[in-house]
Image (tube, rainbow, N blue to C red):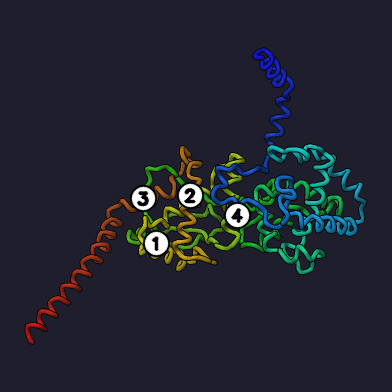
């Protein structure tokens, strides 16, 4: 038995094409989120209305309901571009193998090129229509999609629910030709602009979530140390040291800067989409072996908000963020928001352990600590904190004297 195992293993190694395996690894960009990352927010990674790609195909009765709509949209696409289904199938099958390589851990029946091509065509036409209407289905030919457009937008931005952008480009090229054709990234631009005000859409990206992540990061030199020896002071405490908070002039999570005594933070829209979106950004960065830029941002914000159980300090921290228009669209209490940031960071902090800054620049958290350790900021904070205590004691002492004086006169 031992010899047989050795022979089988050696045969497997010999049959492996190293170049082909390397090519497949380089193409891989769509992943299943591992269980250790999903808990306790598994709903943030699963589609609620419509599935795109193989991972959640007909995964529950609620997703099966949209399959007839996909077939109707395919018929509409063929009529619109005046092409036969055979033409579309032929074009998709030519690139089926490369498209299959984009998915990590592809299982039956999706390892069959015919079956996989069928899925890419149906899902691709549906996603294409969604993008052509920029998330607005007021003129959409399918009533079913129009009624649940908000949830479709959320489903489009899940890591496990992605299609390679190449699928969209194939369908665009078939319908409108390669000369003067609409680029798939232009369609993504329209969708993202309808969700948030962002910077320029990049000319790269392997799927919609990746394009959105690159866009959301923006440009900037934000470096977060992430090591435990940096004890960052909260926003309200930083104000005592003379640090002023302002909104970043640039757009993007990387636009955090600290110069002079001014800390600039980007605007963060907090709505029904934000939690799922940020968690899927973090998952993609981890699975795709990217630098954890989004998690670094979330951890930095958590350190600024963290009140260590002091409700008054938490209120002061959140009030600063809202007054400077750093956060908007709040749907919960200050405690709920702080708990969410802390929960995300706590569940994913292991991804940052051992991480060194990606550049040789000084990280923003260390810059803040260095500033707070200077003589004048330390003296300022000491005076402010001391004055608060002295003022209270002075008021109490004055009231006591007045009461004593009044009782003496009586």
Residue 242's place in the image compared with 344, above or below, is below
User: How far is mark 2 from mark 1, CA to CA?
Assistant: 17 Å
Residue sitting at x 52%, y 48%: 295
Marked residue nearer the N-terminal end (2 or 1): 1
Mark 2, residue position: 345
Mark 1, residue position: 314
- What secondary structure is found at the residue carrying circle 1? helix
Residue 283's place in the image compared with 71, above or below, is above
User: How far is mark 4 from mark 2, CA to CA?
Assistant: 15 Å
Residue 369 numbered tag: 3
Marked residue nearer the N-terminal end (3 or 1): 1
Give the side of residue 174 with respect to residue 220, left or right.
right
Q: Nearer the viewer, residue 66 or 356?
A: 66
User: How far is mark 3 from mark 1, CA to CA?
Assistant: 20 Å
Marked residue nearer the N-terminal end (4 or 2): 4
Q: CB under 8 Å between callouts 3 and 2?
A: no
- What secondary structure is found at the residue carrying circle 2? helix
Marked residue nearer the N-terminal end (3 or 2): 2
Instruction: Give x and y (percent) for residue 341.
Output: 48, 55
- Which of the two marks, 3 or 4, is nearer to us in this view? 4
Mark 4, residue position: 277
Residue sitting at x 27%, y 62%: 385
Which residue is the extreme one toward the bottom? 410
Q: Quadrant of residue 229?
A: top left
User: How far is mark 3 from mark 4, CA to CA?
Assistant: 31 Å
Instruction: Give x and y (percent) for residue 108.
Output: 76, 38
Q: CB under 8 Å between callouts 4 and 1?
A: no
Marked residue nearer the N-terminal end (4 or 1): 4
Disc 3 packing (10 Å; few <14; some 14–19; many ≥20): some
Q: Quadrant of residue 362?
A: top left
């Amino acid at each position: 038995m031992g010899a047989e195992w050795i022979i089988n293993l050696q045969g497997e190694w010999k049959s492996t094409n190293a170049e082909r395996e390397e090519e497949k690894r380089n193409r891989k960009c769509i992943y299943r989120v591992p269980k250790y990352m999903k808990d306790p927010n598994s709903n943030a990674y699963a589609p609620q209305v419509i599935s795109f790609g193989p991972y959640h195909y007909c995964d529950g009765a609620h997703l099966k309901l949209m399959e007839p709509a996909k077939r109707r949209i395919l018929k509409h696409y063929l009529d619109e571009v005046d092409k036969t289904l055979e033409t579309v199938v032929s074009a998709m099958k030519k690139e089926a193998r490369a498209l299959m390589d984009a998915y990590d851990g592809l299982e039956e029946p999706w390892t069959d090129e015919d079956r996989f091509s069928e899925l890419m065509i149906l899902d691709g036409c549906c996603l294409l229509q969604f993008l052509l209407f920029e998330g607005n289905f007021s003129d959409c030919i399918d009533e079913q999609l129009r009624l649940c457009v908000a949830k479709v937008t959320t489903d489009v931005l899940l890591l496990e629910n992605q299609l390679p952008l190449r699928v969209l480009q194939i369908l665009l090229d078939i319908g409108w030709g390669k000369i003067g054709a609409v680029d798939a990234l232009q369609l993504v631009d329209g969708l993202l602009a309808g969700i948030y005000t962002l910077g320029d859409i990049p000319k790269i990206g392997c799927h919609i979530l990746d394009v959105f992540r690159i866009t959301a990061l923006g440009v900037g030199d934000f470096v977060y140390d992430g090591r435990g020896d940096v004890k960052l002071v909260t926003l309200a405490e930083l104000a005592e040291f003379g640090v002023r908070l302002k909104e970043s002039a640039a757009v993007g999570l990387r636009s955090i800067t600290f110069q002079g005594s001014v800390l600039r933070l980007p605007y963060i829209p907090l709505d029904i989409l934000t939690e799922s979106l940020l968690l899927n950004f973090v998952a993609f960065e981890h699975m795709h072996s990217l630098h954890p830029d989004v998690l670094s941002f979330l951890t930095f914000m958590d350190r600024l908000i963290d009140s260590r159980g002091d409700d008054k300090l938490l209120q002061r921290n959140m009030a600063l963020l809202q007054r400077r228009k750093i956060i908007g669209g709040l749907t919960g209490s200050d405690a709920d928001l702080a708990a969410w940031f802390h929960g995300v960071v706590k569940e994913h902090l292991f991804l940052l352990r051992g991480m060194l800054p990606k550049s040789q620049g000084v990280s923003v958290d260390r810059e803040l600590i260095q500033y707070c350790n200077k003589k004048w900021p330390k003296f300022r904070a000491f005076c402010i904190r001391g004055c608060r205590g002295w003022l209270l004691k002075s008021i109490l002492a004055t009231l006591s004297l007045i009461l004593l004086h009044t009782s003496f006169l009586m």
